[in-house]
Image (cartoon, grey):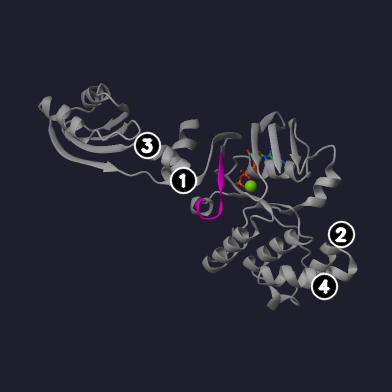
């Protein structure tokens, strides 16, 4: 449903997005995860025809976002980072205005608006002026306008930002219910968001894709690299060298100030339990083994690891 190939966007000589490629199948929810400035909004603006790419192509429902932008716009609902709400309008008149622009037939307008207001839970503020709504309600109005005209594809730029925990829960379940009928791409820098709502995750950092997998796959990918933490009574550099030589060890970090025990973290190969071997290696050197424990890796660690590796 969405095909992005080798997309690059250059702003004043700086690459905001560089050679990004990914696909989203019909009915899927894709999470676009990355820290501030990663290039999430830039990619979404290109997908929604708000600006052209410098290089590469993007297609939505088979239409090129640049050459057939009218067809693409008809099929996309977009929640921008800062929704362009008309602050002096009431919620209802604003949604009516958007429905007209989107070409909803007059006979269906009212029922469509009632439907999206119900789905985003804003019926109680329908007559209120947008400018005086709370941030969370404004955000919901933004989601409501994206849903108008029942688009095949929804592009949601940080849909839960500024919402309270209850609203976050509601918006997430709303998005989940959209899957199947709609294809959704949402951006976030909140990790639990992707594990809770998305089928697949693209992690971007500094404009580049650094990982693409299911949330479970990402967690497993790192779980494979089991980690063991040790506290060793021995010189950090010597401990590091000794443990690096152990079969199955991928990496060792060791820090210690002269005279105090060294804090050591060992990354081991997938599905290996090296705790006994590591303990033996330390003790055989005549160093004291003060602590040893396995560390389980969360999706959070995967994310931090991926984005710091890049830098
Ligand atoms: N109009 C612009 N002109 C110049 N540089 C821009 C422009 N818009 C974005 N950038 C730069 O492009 C890079 C990517 O920005 P983008 O807004 O896509 O990031 P993001 O992932 O959406 O970040 P955030 O989580 O903060 O919303 C940043 O370095 C940003 O400074
Ligand atoms: Mg952004």
286 displayed left or right of 94: left
Residues 293 and 16: in front is 293
Q: Report ligand 1 position as a quadrant.
A: top right
Q: Which mark is residue 110?
A: 4
The residue carrying mark 3 is 224
In 3D space, how far apart are the residues under numbered discs 1 and 4 (Cα atoms)? 42 Å
Q: Which residue is found at the position 64% from the left and 33% from the top? A: 20
Whichever of callouts 3 and 2 sits on the residue coming sooner in the sequence is: 2
198 displayed left or right of 238: right
10 displayed left or right of 108: left
Q: Which residues are magenta?
A: 195-203
Whichever of callouts 2 and 4 sits on the residue coming sooner in the sequence is: 2
Query: As displayed, is residue 99 above or below residue 49?
Result: below
Which residue is the extreme one toward the left? 286
Whichever of callouts 1 and 3 sits on the residue coming sooner in the sequence is: 1
Classify mark 4: residues with Cα within 10 Å, few (<14), some (14-19) or many (20+).
Answer: some
Q: Is residue 29 found inside the magenta-colored segment of the image?
A: no
């Amino acid at each position: 449903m969405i095909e992005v190939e080798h997309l690059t966007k250059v702003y004043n000589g700086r690459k905001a997005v560089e050679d990004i490629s990914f696909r989203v199948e019909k009915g899927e929810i894709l999470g676009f995860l990355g820290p501030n400035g990663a290039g999430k909004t830039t990619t979404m603006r290109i997908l929604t025809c708000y600006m052209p790419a410098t290089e590469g192509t993007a297609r939505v429902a088979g239409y090129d976002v640049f050459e057939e932008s009218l067809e693409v716009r008809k099929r996309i609902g977009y929640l921008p980072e800062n929704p362009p709400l008309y602050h002096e309008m009431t919620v209802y008149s604003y949604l009516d205005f958007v429905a007209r622009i989107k070409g909803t037939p007059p006979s269906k307008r009212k029922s469509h608006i009632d439907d999206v207001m119900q789905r985003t839970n804003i019926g109680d503020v329908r007559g209120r002026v947008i400018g005086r709504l709370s941030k969370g309600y404004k955000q919901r109005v933004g989601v409501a306008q994206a849903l108008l005209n029942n688009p095949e594809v929804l592009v949601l730029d940080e849909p839960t930002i500024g919402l309270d925990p209850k609203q976050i829960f509601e918006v997430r379940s709303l998005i989940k219910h959209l899957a199947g009928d709609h294809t959704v791409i949402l951006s976030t820098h909140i990790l639990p968001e992707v594990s809770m709502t998305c089928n697949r995750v693209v992690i971007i950092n500094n404009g580049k894709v650094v990982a693409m997998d299911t949330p479970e796959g990402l967690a497993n990918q790192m779980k494979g690299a089991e980690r063991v933490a040790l506290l060793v009574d021995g010189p950090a550099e010597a401990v590091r060298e000794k443990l690096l030589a152990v079969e199955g060890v991928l990496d060792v970090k060791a820090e210690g100030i002269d005279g105090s025990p060294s804090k050591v973290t060992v990354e081991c190969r997938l599905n290996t339990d090296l705790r006994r071997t590591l303990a033996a290696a330390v003790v055989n050197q005549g160093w004291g083994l003060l602590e040893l424990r396995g560390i389980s890796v969360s999706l959070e660690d995967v994310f931090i690891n991926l984005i710091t590796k890049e830098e």
